[in-house]
Image (cartoon, rainbow, N blue to C red):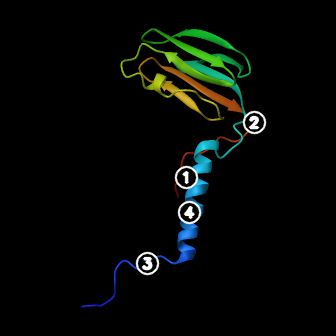
Amino acid sequence: MSDRSWPAAPAPGDVGLILLALLATAVLAFTGADGQGAQRVVIDVEGVTRYDVSLDSQWTVTVDGLLGPSVVRVVGGRVRIESAPCPGQICVARGWLRAVGDLAVCVPNHVVVHLTGDAPPRFDGITQ
């Protein structure tokens, strides 16, 4: 048997590095890793673009999907699916979209709302 104690106590530099990583993670989580850059709202129904409008506008539109009407609201530089006829309501729970590449999809109703713009889309994960 080994008389080595396990686990070894972290060095002061390790503690500082861990705290720095936690702080950076918190900052990115609350502020985002990009400048948003979304300029347009695109609403597709059954694979066809029905609306392509400025995100700077303020409006509410009802789009008819496969199951019925979905209400999409744009206000203050953000957009969301406010109501939908689907059973799970995942698209409504998605909440406000703000950045390029953000999207809300109502799969049963065949409605897709996504944001476009000049900035590259942000990533929520990268694999190699």
Residue 9, disc = 3
Q: Secondary structure at mark 3?
A: loop
Q: Secondary structure at mark 4?
A: helix
Q: Secondary structure at mark 2?
A: loop
> Of label 1 and label 2, which has the lower sequence position?
2
> Of label 3 and label 2, which has the lower sequence position?
3
Above or below, 5 relative to 87: below
Distance CA(mark 1)–CA(mark 3): 32 Å
- Look at the image and tell me in which quarter the N terminus lies: bottom left
Q: Is residue 49 left or right of residue 68?
A: right
Of the residues tagged 3 and 2, which is closer to the observer?
3
Q: Residue at x 56, y 30 (%)?
A: 103
Q: Which residue is mark 4?
A: 19
> Of label 1 and label 3, which has the lower sequence position?
3
Q: Which residue is mark 2?
A: 118
Q: Which residue is mark 1?
A: 126
Residue type of the residue flagged with mark 2: Asp
Q: Nearer the viewer, residue 35 or 14?
A: 14
